[in-house]
Amino acid sequence: AHATFVPVKTATKGAAAGPLVLMAVAAGAAANAEAQQRQALEKITTLLEELKQEKLDDERSDLKGSAGAVKKAAAILLDRGEVGHSLGLDSAVHTIDKELSRTEDRLGKWRDALRRLPEDKGVELSALKAFSGVAGKGGQFRTHLEIATLAIALKRRVIVLQAVEHAQASEGNVFERFSRELKTDQERIDELESGINDVLLRLSSLQIKRQSGFRSPVFTGAEVDKLMKQAHRIHSLGKQVEHRDGTPDVAIDIARRRDGSVTVLPAVAAG
């Protein structure tokens, strides 16, 4: 969404232009993903300090380790090197995929819980047990969200790295089957992210009402303040939703002169 165009250095005669663009895309994806990873890790660390939940702390640590492997792999590829097993990228991808599967399971439970809620009626906080701590500042639900954000950001980066790695290893090979698998991965995380956004929007639109069972029909000032804060925290979930423009592909034209230099033209929507 915030592209920066920079000059491409003069290429040697006969050099293929395609890998230059792939490396440029990889560099851009790496910078964007690193920012997302850093923000998500900072939020997760803060939330876990309050929760003291060892299982979630392990998930955070595993993803943090995977982020290091992905970063090294990106650096190797941008230096036109080969990604070897010593970097641990394979195990990192396995960890990321495992976390995405956990997120899909959690998303299914969240959707089921929302389907059981009444339409156009006030909802008590006790009905939101599937979203533990949603009315507080932290909570398990918000930690799950940040872990999901980190896993999705890492997976997006891995998809680009895998494409660049194979393109550099065998220039001219279009990798039709492999490309289809990468596209399937992309669609999977897009669908996962969309599902999470739907859950957040649904939660943010809920009307939170007072817990039943109170004898007094009158609210105290403290009760009103507490309910208002809880409702505000739930309604603010909608602000976390990022709206994409719906344009998945772009076209980048390149002109190469006889002396081997190249000119990369601005990206346009592919149609």
Image (cartoon, grey):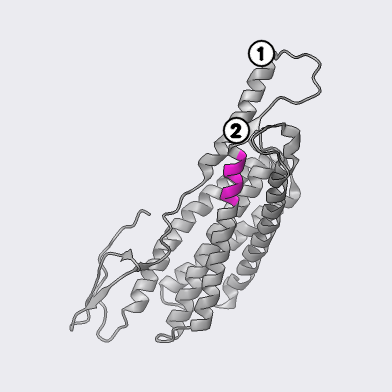
The residue lying at 43 percent from left, 58 percent from top is 246
Q: Residues within 10 Å of mark 1 (few under 14, many from 20)?
A: few
Q: Choose between 11 and 18: the one closer to the eye.
A: 18
Identify which amino acid the numbered label 2 is placed on: Arg
Front-most of residues 112 and 225: 112
Span shown in magenta: 196-203
Q: Quadrant of residue 167?
A: bottom left
> At 34% across and 74% down in the image, what residue appears?
20
Judged from the image, the secondary structure of the residue bearing numbered disc 1 is helix
Q: Is residue 198 magenta?
A: yes
Query: Is 81 within the magenta?
Result: no
Residue 71: % across, % down: 51, 64
Give the SS element for disc 2.
helix
Q: Is most of the magenta stretch helix, strand or loop?
A: helix
Residue at the image point whose x is 43% and y is 62% from the top: 29
Question: How far across and down, in percent of the image, does residue 13 sit?
Answer: 24, 85
Q: Compared to 106, does 66 lie above or below?
A: below
Residue in the image at 53% along x and 58% along y? 153
Q: Which residue is mark 1?
A: 221
| Residue 133, percent from left and from top | 69, 37
Please give the count of numbered marks on the rendered protein: 2
CB under 8 Å between callouts 2 and 1? no
Q: Is residue 173 above or below residue 21?
A: below
